[in-house]
Image (cartoon, rainbow, N blue to C red):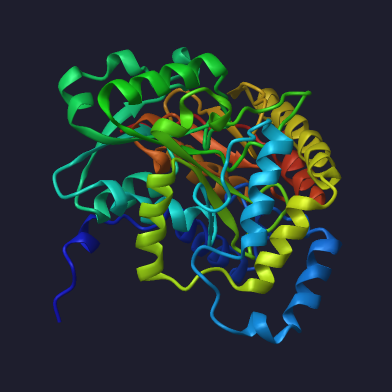
């Protein structure tokens, strides 16, 4: 049996590897504190689950759903964008597409724009699916380095003209995973002008827009004039309503791009179960207080963990948004060696920054989606830990 050559290009998915490490440690009887995976530990709000229970008893919801979702769910997405971001120009019939989680749409969208040999502009460090989707489509990723001195924003002026001219898509993600960085309106406007100049599809992943701290309010790329001419935005209910397990996301924006994604999806999946679509309607149209309640919990956790990291001598800038802390590792360590040392000495799991790309080297990512009692145990372990001198050789 011969397998596809593309499998040789696939690295093990980082979060699968983290899950294996945790399972192995726990099988050895070790109590692991994990800051690894950004999977909310807070339950889905009860009214949203109640809507699922009710909807699951409706016989019509037991059948195949439509790929483009219920009209009611598309209208709810458009209305949420209007209420939350003031984006009043989304046509729910042509410019909104429900997704089986944002990851599904992010993975599929590469097939809409990229042919073998084409170029995608991909940030580094970044969510791995941007480059994996590019590879599946047979295209090449051109790395846009994210570095601290630029506020973890791609330097669009540093992209060579000949690369920009040949590129078909550009990925942006703010609030950012893994760095926690944010983008302002001026940056989005510059990105829109860049995309227009080079005829590039701008793909913005806004999955963390609702996880914010200290009064910060994230923007939608769709708020900017001209955004709909050049791009689409991906969103998700996973992080803002603790619905990672239910798999509901969306893409909104340019009608031709939405139609292209619909065409790919309709040939590869059968849509979101309708009972889960009804959950999404409840989340989008119901009380938004759950978002603020979540963020209050995450902010307390953020501050506790940052305090512990600072006392260890690790440098971390408090993020305005996202579920993550992005901390510089001590001199002499790599991302992987420091993560391994931390695991061996304290049974604390973090994600090496190098898992997100070459420019993530020298950092670790810590997720705040760990129950409060485990956060406290982690902070306690960090308080009693002394970082060993790095091994030489």
Please state if 343 lies on the left or on the right of 127 as rendered: right
Q: Is residue 33 above or below residue 127?
A: below
Question: Considering the image in quadrants, where does the N terminus appear?
Answer: bottom left
- Residue appearing at x 58%, y 84% in the figure: 63
Q: Is residue 211 visible?
A: no
Where's residue 268, x and y in %? 37, 69
Where's residue 135, x and y in %? 25, 51
- Residue appearing at x 76%, y 55% in the figure: 283
User: Depth check: 154 or 371 in front?
Assistant: 154
Q: Is residue 374 above or below residue 311?
A: below
- Residue appearing at x 73%, y 80% in the figure: 56
Where's residue 195, x and y in %? 34, 26
Q: Is residue 104 visible?
A: yes
Count of numbered badges drawn on the protein: 0
User: Depth check: 93 or 190 in front?
Assistant: 93
Please state if 301 lies on the left or on the right of 74 as rendered: right
- Residue appearing at x 33%, y 52% in the figure: 133
Please state if 78 lies on the left or on the right of 173 as rendered: right
User: Depth check: 7 or 142 in front?
Assistant: 142
Where's residue 265, x and y in %? 40, 63
Question: Considering the image in quadrants, where does the C terminus appear?
Answer: top left
Quarter occupied by residue 316:
top right
User: Depth check: 274 or 142 in front?
Assistant: 274
């Amino acid at each position: 049996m011969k397998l596809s050559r593309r499998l040789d290009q696939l690295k093990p998915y980082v979060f699968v590897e983290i899950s294996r490490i945790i399972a192995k440690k726990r099988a050895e009887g070790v109590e692991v504190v994990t800051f690894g995976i950004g999977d909310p530990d807070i339950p889905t709000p009860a009214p949203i689950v109640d809507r699922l229970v009710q909807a699951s008893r409706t016989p019509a919801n037991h059948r195949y759903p439509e790929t483009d979702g219920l009209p009611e769910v598309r209208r709810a997405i458009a209305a949420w964008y209007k209420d939350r971001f003031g984006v009043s120009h989304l046509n729910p019939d042509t410019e909104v597409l429900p997704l089986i989680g944002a990851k599904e749409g992010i993975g599929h969208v590469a097939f809409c724009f990229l042919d073998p040999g084409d170029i995608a502009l991909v940030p580094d460090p970044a969510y791995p699916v941007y480059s994996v989707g590019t590879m599946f489509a047979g295209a090449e990723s051109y790395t846009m380095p994210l570095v601290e001195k630029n506020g973890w924003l791609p330097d669009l002026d540093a992209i060579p003209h000949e690369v920009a001219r040949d590129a078909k898509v550009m990925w942006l993600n703010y609030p950012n995973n893994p760095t926690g960085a944010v983008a302002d309106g001026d940056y989005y406007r510059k990105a829109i002008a860049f995309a227009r100049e080079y005829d590039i599809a701008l793909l913005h992943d806004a999955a963390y827009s609702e996880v914010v701290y200290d009064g910060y309010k994230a923007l939608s790329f769709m708020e900017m004039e001209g955004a709909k001419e050049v791009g689409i935005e991906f969103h998700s209910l996973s992080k803002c309503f603790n619905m990672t397990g239910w798999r509901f996301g969306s893409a909104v924006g340019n009608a031709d791009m939405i139609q292209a994604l619909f065409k790919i999806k309709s040939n590869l999946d059968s849509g979101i179960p309708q009972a889960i679509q009804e959950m999404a309607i409840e989340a989008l149209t119901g009380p938004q207080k759950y978002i603020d309640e979540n963020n209050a919990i995450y902010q307390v956790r953020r501050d506790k963990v940052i305090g512990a990291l600072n006392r260890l001598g690790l440098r971390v800038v408090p993020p305005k948004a996202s579920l993550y802390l992005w901390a510089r590792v001590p001199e002499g360590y790599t991302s992987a060696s420091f993560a391994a040392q931390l695991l061996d000495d304290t049974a604390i799991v973090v994600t090496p920054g190098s898992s997100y790309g070459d420019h993530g080297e020298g950092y670790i990512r810590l997720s705040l989606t760990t129950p409060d009692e485990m956060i406290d145990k982690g902070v306690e372990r960090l308080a009693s830990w002394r970082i060993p001198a790095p091994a030489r050789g």
